[in-house]
Image (tube, helix red, strand yellow):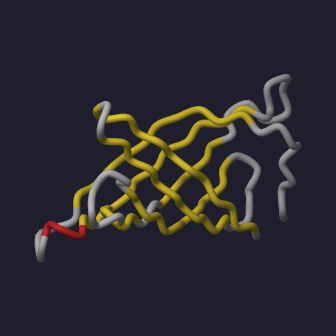
Amino acid sequence: MKAFFEHRYEYVDYDEQIFEFAGFYNFKSREYHRFSVGLGVTFVPEWNDMINSFSFPVQLEIFPLKNQKFDRLSLIVELSPEKVIDAGEGFPTFRYLLGIRYNFKKLKIEN
């Protein structure tokens, strides 16, 4: 069990930059996957209302190359419902992320 934080940056236009801070809770790592849930806050410094949205990411990290030379490499699949504050009572938007992660520390597998 481990909590971690990450920062994401998005450059939309030269006068609009988006920063997201997210905190995650990792469930027990299994041999070939790890599941995490979190809470994120998006800021747009150029806007008067600094907080733009809240997100609730759900992340699955898959370790396809366990016990091989590249065992610290993993695939990330994330789905994140996002509630924009100025959107009123509308439905939340959904974002997704597909990525590759390299861990510099050896991952401990909990049984």
- Which residue lies at the image location 51% right of the left edge and 46% below the top edge? 8
Q: Quadrant of the N terminus?
A: bottom right
- Which residue lies at the image location 28% right of the left edge and 67% below the top edge? 49
**Who is closer to the viewer here, 11 or 81?**
11
Question: Could you tell me how many numbered marks the image carries?
Answer: 0
Residue 28 place in picture, x, y as percent? 73, 65
Residue 100 place in picture, x, y as percent? 59, 32
Eyeballing the image, is 68 above or below 72? above
Q: Quadrant of the C terminus?
A: bottom right
Eyeballing the image, is 6 above or below 68? below
**Who is closer to the viewer here, 102 or 84?**
84
Horizontal relation, residue 2 to residue 86: left or right: right
- Which residue lies at the image location 48% right of the left edge and 60% below the top edge? 58
Q: Quadrant of residue 62?
A: top right
Residue 9 place in picture, x, y as percent? 47, 42
Residue 15 place in picture, x, y as percent? 29, 37
- Which residue lies at the image location 60% right of the left edge and 64% below the top edge? 24
Looking at this rendering, what residue extends furthest in the top direction?
69
Eyeballing the image, is 40 above or below 19? below
